[in-house]
Image (cartoon, rainbow, N blue to C red):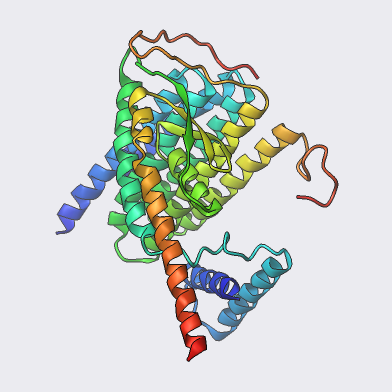
Amino acid sequence: MALVLDILSWISILIGAAFCLIGGIGLLRLPDVFSRMHAAGIVDTVGVVFIVLGLLLQAGWSMAAIKLLLIVFFVLYTSPVSTHALAQAAVSVGARPWVVDEDDEPTEKGDESSKT
Amino acid sequence: MLHALSLGLVLGVLWLLLSGYFVPLILALGLASVVLVVFIAHRMDVIDHEGQPVHLSWRIFPYWLWLLKEIFVSAVHVSRVILQPRMPIRPRMLNLKATQHTELGHVIYANSITLTPGTVTVELDDDNLAVHALTKETAEGLESGDMDRWVAAVEWETQLDQLIAARRAELKKDE
Amino acid sequence: MFVAAAIAVLVTMLLALILAIKGPTVYDRILAVNTFGTLTVLLIAVLGFLSGRPAFLDIGLVYALINFITTIAIMKFFKYSRLGRHSGEDLGGL
């Protein structure tokens, strides 16, 4: 039983770590601030949830589990608020997202970042 | 009053969980700090239905589960888009109309959109949302209106609960 | 296994740091710092388990809250150039 729990928690931690890395790669690859927010969103939600889930399985029923749940709760509650505030602040100073209208034309990875 | 009690209860439970001491002196100090915080919050006039949404219906819990599933699905989608060498992103802005009736419903909807990877709420003005979507699929997922209906259902149940409670109170008064 | 998670989180922190340094606009940098903070919370939690000291989680909890307030405060500062009130508003409003 303990072994099953261990394996489950390792899988969960590995998934979370992979999502964190993907989010980090996305932060650097995506072209402008608005699309980078999506990559940050991966780290903030799935990365945190899976890594903490893995730690939770290691912790068992203890104080540590409660604190881990509180960490997930706070991160999931605060991250959309700060992301939205960031997007709104960027728009309010005149930054416009880089938008592709055509659905079929392949996207060039142009570094057409929004202006400040 | 209900909101103040709920705030005090939340703070008290949080304090007990985080401290882990059950000595009378420490407990008294904890109680004093809870009372102080509730008093300060009362003076700041921030104890209301927005800070303490005690009236939200139980439907919020199945919604959270559904939202977690949705977050996972779109995170996998966005990850695959990011990892492809050509990176087929189609960023676009959407204008959505929220069908909820209360401000709390709008905020829950907007924050759920932001929480889902692939879509970010850029502006929220009354019931008009400006949303930035990373790809065609995430935009279509949002336009299908599933999330909107879920939040509206949670809100509707909430209003129903309130109506029932009000009616019960009325009946009790009549007796 | 904790070591692998800690290394993955550290590498991601490095990527976020690169964005914070090279990011063309100030908003890229704020986003990078926000992500960096979230990853720090994760790193603290993982390190707590790695060294077998659950007290680390309290620090992580506080860090998660401070990270949020930091982001909001920086944003407000860049948007209004002051922390106390909105530009053009009377004193007394938030």
Name the quarter where the C terminus of chain A is drawn.
Answer: top right
Q: Is residue C53 visible?
A: no
Q: Taking B87 as reference, is C15 above or below it? A: below
Question: Going 29% across and 55% down the picture, which residue do you hit?
Answer: A58
Is any part of residue C25 visible from this angle? yes
Q: Quadrant of residue A38?
A: top left
Residue at the spot 69% in from the left edge and 38% down from the top edge:
C76
| Place of residue C43 in the rendered image (x, y in percent of width and height, measured from the top left) | 44, 43
Quarter placement of the N terminus of chain A: bottom left
| Along the line of sight, the residue nearer the viewer: B174 or B9 | B174
Q: State the image coordinates of residue B9 (x, y, percent, origin top left).
A: 52, 74
Tell me if residue A105 comes above or below residue A72 in the rendering. above
Q: Position of residue B68 (x, y in %)?
A: 33, 47
Q: Is residue A19 left or right of residue B34?
A: left
Left or right position of B74 against B100: left
Is C7 displayed left or right of B171 in the figure? left
Depth check, front residue: B154 or C25: B154
Image location (x, y in percent) of residue A8:
21, 49
